Image: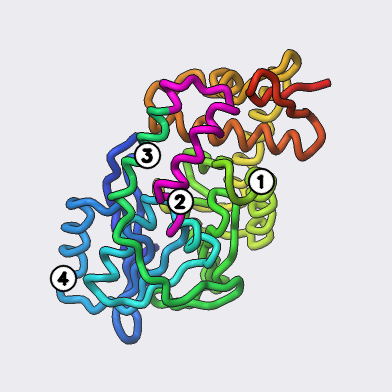
């Protein structure tokens, strides 16, 4: 299918449990287009040197600001002098989220979440370890707009905003072939991480569910994700993801009968998480689910003894 579309999948290894990211390379009229770049490290730089040998890159499209997609954007842009495009929302996040003053805001927020100080320090140190993986920052030449059309390989794709996993995440859709480059919006085996990071969209899970409904209307036949392998029937997978979140929300709501801190609720939802990197995402996802319930009016949040307590009345 990828050959038919004129798209080459560039699978890059990642040094954590989500062990790879799918980036894409496609020949255009005047040169080559790269979609996402991986982390900035020696391995990624060497892989792109190999993949792009003898090729002139005209454009780099970044689907969102997370390090495994955005990290090497600046480094690759510097090498290729390509025009770089992404949404303004995620461009602003990518240029700010890894700065020291921003990282330190997590200290107070993690305290409010009821996270012990020793664990809080580990989580912040884990975030800070990504700083060299996202620099140098790219120069964003063009902000992508909803409904814009871009050429990727043999076909033209519509840019569709699907916030949730990040505030400015985009996917690419070709109606002629019913193909969705789903980036991190829809994945085949795992559910995309939907986290609240104490900034940006205050209800990312609510936004994500709306974005799923938006993509459901396309009834996409072929889905090419940024993690995992291509699969068919986008709507079937959307139903599975929505059922997963409904189940998680029901479980969480039941735990709030006696009140929970974010940290306590996280241990109930993610009992099998045992490393710092995954714990950081588990806490963010727990908080996103708690805030979704709060915005729906199904639970309340109060501060007791310097910590947020979520509870049902």
Q: State the image coordinates of residue 58 (x, y, percent, origin top left).
A: 32, 79
Is residue 88 or residue 289 the one in the foreground? 88
Q: Is residue 174 magenta?
A: no
**In terms of sequence position, does the residue under pointer 1 or pointer 2 come before the other?**
2
Residue under pointer 4: 53
Query: Is 296 left or right of 163, judged from the image as shown?
Result: right
Task: Classify 10 Å Cα crowding around label 2: few (below 14), some (14-19), many (20 and above).
Answer: some
**In terms of sequence position, does the residue under pointer 1 or pointer 3 come before the other?**
3
Q: State the image coordinates of residue 61 (x, y, percent, origin top left).
A: 41, 68
Position above or below: 4 against 131: below
SS under mark 4: loop
Q: State the image coordinates of residue 184 (x, y, percent, origin top left).
A: 48, 51
Q: Are marks 3 and 4 in contact (CB under 8 Å)?
A: no
Which residue lies at the image location 36% right of the left edge and 34% below the top edge? Answer: 125
Give the distance between the C-alpha atoms of the residues marked 3 and 4, in whole angstroms: 28 Å
SS under mark 3: loop
- On the image, which quarter does residue 59 sit in? bottom left
Residue 97's disc is: 2
- On the image, which quarter does residue 214 sit in? bottom right
Residue under pointer 3: 18
**In terms of sequence position, does the residue under pointer 3 or pointer 2 come before the other?**
3
Which residue lies at the image location 29% right of the left edge and 70% below the top edge? Answer: 77
Give the distance between the C-alpha atoms of the residues marked 1 and 4, in whole angstroms: 43 Å
SS under mark 2: loop
Position above or below: 61 against 105: below
Q: What residue range appears in magenta?
A: 95-120
Residue under pointer 1: 202
Position above or below: 137 against 247: below
Which residue lies at the image location 38% right of the left edge and 57% below the top edge? Answer: 70
* Front position among marks 1 and 4: 1
């Amino acid at each position: 299918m990828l050959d038919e579309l004129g798209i080459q999948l560039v699978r890059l290894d990642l040094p954590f449990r989500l062990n790879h990211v799918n980036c894409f390379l496609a020949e255009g009229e005047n040169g080559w287009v790269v979609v996402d770049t991986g982390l900035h490290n020696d391995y990624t730089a060497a892989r792109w040197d190999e993949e792009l040998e003898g090729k002139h890159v005209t454009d780099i499209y970044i689907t969102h600001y997370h390090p495994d997609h955005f990290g090497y954007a600046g480094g690759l842009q510097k090498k290729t002098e390509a025009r770089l495009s992404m949404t303004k929302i995620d461009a602003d996040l990518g240029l700010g989220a890894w700065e020291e003053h921003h990282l330190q805001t997590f200290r107070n927020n993690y305290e409010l979440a009821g996270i012990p100080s020793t664990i809080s320090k580990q989580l912040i140190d884990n975030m800070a370890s990504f700083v060299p993986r996202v620099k140098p920052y790219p120069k964003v030449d063009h902000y992508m707009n909803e409904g814009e059309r871009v050429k990727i390989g043999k076909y033209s794709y519509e840019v569709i905003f699907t916030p949730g996993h990040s505030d400015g995440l985009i996917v690419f859709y070709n109606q002629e072939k019913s193909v969705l480059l789903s980036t991190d919006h829809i994945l085949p085996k795992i559910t995309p991480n939907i986290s609240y990071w104490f900034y940006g969209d205050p209800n990312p899970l609510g936004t994500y569910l709306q974005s799923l409904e938006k993509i459901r209307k396309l009834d996409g036949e072929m889905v090419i994700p940024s993690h995992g392998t291509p699969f068919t029937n986008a709507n079937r997978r959307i139903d599975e993801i929505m059922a997963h979140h409904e189940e998680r929300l029901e479980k969480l709501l039941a735990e709030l009968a006696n009140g929970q801190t974010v940290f306590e609720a996280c241990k109930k939802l993610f009992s099998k998480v045992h490393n710092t990197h995954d714990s950081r995402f588990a806490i963010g996802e727990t908080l996103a689910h708690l805030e979704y319930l709060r915005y729906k009016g199904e639970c309340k949040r109060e501060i007791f003894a310097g910590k947020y307590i979520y509870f049902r009345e």
